[in-house]
């Protein structure tokens, strides 16, 4: 407070001295500006989702390197160890819908924490298996535990990410899964070699599985403490961030799915969902060649060394990872320019059509380097559409995005499980060119099927689901 100042005395006539008090107030403009700036909690939520995807695939794919050692140490045929992989995929596929529904009903915080703890305990148990029966059971439990991870993540990302950035966020999670799949073989092999060099007098793969379990359990603790189901519930979000997330087309803090009913009839009557189920099935059938069988093809057909085959596989996988991010940016930009329907359709139709052409060209090529180059293109384009696919499930599913994505993901994993067994037999009988032709046909069907998908048509009426009117963006 400044000192009082008397009024001037040189005024005509008798005059009483009046005192004015001037108060010096601090400059609060910067403080107000800072308070109005949105907080960035949503980015932390996205980081948690991406790291979960890395751990998901790290635990899932770690067995690929350990299979020969498991077969030797447990004295069981390698084919039976492969049966445990099939047990995982079938349980993972069949539990997609119930796990996704539970994620919608409970919310991401409770459901995803439970899923990660469950599958971490299963991977830890694999470090103590004594035979084929226990291995089959624990791989099945691993599949059940992981079944709801992506569906639940899609559900809470819808509430935490602005509509205009949803493609990028979904593709970033897909990229995390791809990164975990690339990391798993090399990291598992490295850790197994360290165990062997350390002379622990145990089977080299056992401590590795237990170590992976601790990573998952640590993530679950961090997630439980740092995450809330809705932005408005988080102690570190301000009103500006909540408003930004719920901006044009964004998800409001709608009521949890437990307050509304989703009927099987509504799912069955959704034309878009049927086409998305077909799309998920076909892109997984088309992907299986580069996803699991490429090293076998290069070694058997072209006589490449394991090192050369591994390098080519890593190159193809890296192309897919870059395609994930590029496709996410593309669908966000195209929705702003073309509207919701074609902003989701166009990236996938172009990408899947291009992937079909790349696979078809492999059918005509003999040079392995040229074939790998085409598969790099196919991998990039195949993963380019993942962001659009996830976004469309969120668009039509609203508060039930987890359940709806679970339906589609179930079909995709059934396709992957069937193709894993069918494609090698097809190649053995008709040659690997037939496998390339199958992948080309699968992606071609997926490209055409997108004409039947309308992201504006919600499965649950807006009035019932309290969902945002994101489909008004046309």
Image: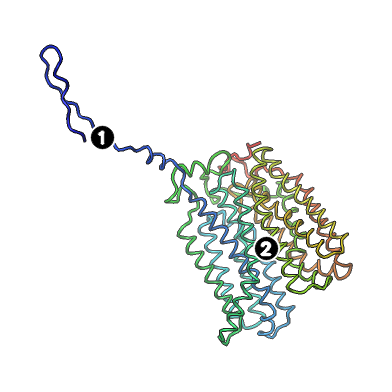
| Image position of 280 with respect to 196: above or below | above
Which residue corresponds to the image point at 59% horizontal and 43% vertical from the top-left?
Answer: 164
Quarter of the figure with the N terminus = top left
Residue 24: image tag = 1
Q: Secondary structure at mark 1?
A: loop
| Quarter occupied by residue 412 | bottom right
Query: In the displayed image of the protein, which residue is found farthest to the front?
Result: 10
Work out whether residue 264 can be spotted: no
Residue 406 placement (x, y as % from top left): 65, 56
Closer to the chain start, of discs 2 and 1, is 1
In the displayed structure, 55 sits above or below 63; it is above
Give the residue furthest to the left.
Answer: 14
x 78%, y 71%: residue = 296
On the rendered image, what quadrant is the C terminus found in?
Answer: top right
Q: Closer to the camera: disc 2 or disc 1?
A: 1
**Residue extending furthest toward the top:** 13
Out of 14 and 70, give the one closest to the viewer. 14
47, above or below 26, in the image: below
Above or below residue 313? Residue 404 is above
Q: Nearer the viewer, residue 311 or 422?
A: 311
Q: Nearer the viewer, residue 42 or 361?
A: 361
Residue at (76, 44) in percent of width and height: 451
Q: Which residue is mark 2?
A: 94
Badge 1: residue crowd in 10 Å (few <14, some 14–19, many ≥20): few
Distance from the alpha carbon under mark 2 to that under mark 1: 69 Å
Percent across and percent down for residue 327 are: 68, 50
Look at the image and tell me whether residue 435 can be seen.
Answer: yes
Residue 352's disc is none
């Amino acid at each position: 407070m400044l000192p009082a100042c008397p009024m001037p005395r040189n005024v005509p006539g008798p005059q009483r001295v009046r005192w004015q008090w001037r108060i010096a107030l601090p400059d609060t403009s910067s403080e107000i500006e800072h308070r109005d700036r949105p907080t960035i909690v949503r980015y932390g939520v996205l980081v948690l989702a991406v790291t979960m995807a890395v751990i998901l695939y790290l635990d899932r794919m770690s067995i690929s390197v350990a299979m020969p050692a498991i077969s030797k140490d447990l004295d069981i045929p390698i084919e039976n160890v492969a049966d445990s992989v099939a047990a995982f995929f079938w349980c993972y596929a069949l539990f997609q819908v119930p796990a996704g529904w539970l994620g919608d009903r409970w919310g991401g915080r409770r459901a995803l924490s439970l899923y990660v703890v469950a599958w971490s305990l299963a991977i830890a148990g694999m470090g103590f298996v004594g035979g084929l029966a226990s291995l089959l059971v624990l791989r099945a439990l691993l599949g059940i535990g992981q079944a709801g991870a992506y569906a639940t993540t899609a559900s809470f990302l819808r509430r935490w990410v602005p509509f205009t950035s949803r493609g990028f966020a979904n593709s970033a999670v897909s990229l995390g899964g791809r990164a975990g799949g690339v990391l798993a073989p090399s990291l598992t092999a490295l850790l197994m070699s360290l165990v062997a060099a350390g002379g622990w007098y145990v089977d080299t793969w056992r401590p590795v599985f237990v170590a992976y379990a601790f990573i998952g359990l640590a993530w679950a603790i961090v997630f439980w403490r740092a995450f809330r189901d809705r932005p408005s519930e988080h102690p570190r979000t301000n009103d500006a961030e909540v408003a930004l997330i719920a901006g044009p087309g964004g998800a409001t803090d709608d009521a949890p799915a437990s307050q509304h009913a989703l009927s099987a009839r509504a799912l069955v009557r959704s034309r878009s969902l049927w086409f998305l189920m077909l799309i998920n099935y076909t892109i997984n059938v088309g992907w299986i060649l580069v996803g699991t069988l490429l090293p076998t093809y290069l070694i058997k057909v072209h006589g490449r060394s394991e090192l050369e085959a591994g390098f080519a596989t890593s190159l193809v996988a890296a192309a897919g990872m870059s395609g994930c991010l590029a496709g996410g940016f593309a669908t966000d930009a195209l929705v702003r320019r073309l509207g919701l329907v074609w902003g989701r359709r166009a990236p996938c139709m172009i990408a899947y059509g291009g992937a079909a052409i790349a696979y078809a060209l492999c059918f005509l090529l003999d040079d392995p380097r040229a074939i790998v180059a085409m598969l790099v293109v196919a991998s990039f384009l195949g993963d380019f559409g993942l962001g659009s696919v996830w976004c469309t499930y969120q668009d039509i599913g609203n508060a039930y995005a987890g359940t709806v994505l679970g339906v589609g993901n179930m079909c995709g994993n059934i396709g992957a499980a069937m193709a894993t067994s069918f494609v090698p037999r097809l190649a053995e009988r008709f040659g690997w060119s037939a496998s390339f032709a199958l992948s080309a046909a699968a992606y071609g069907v997926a490209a055409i099927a997108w004409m039947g998908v309308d992201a504006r048509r919600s499965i649950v009426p807006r009035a019932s689901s309290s969902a945002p009117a994101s489909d008004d963006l046309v």
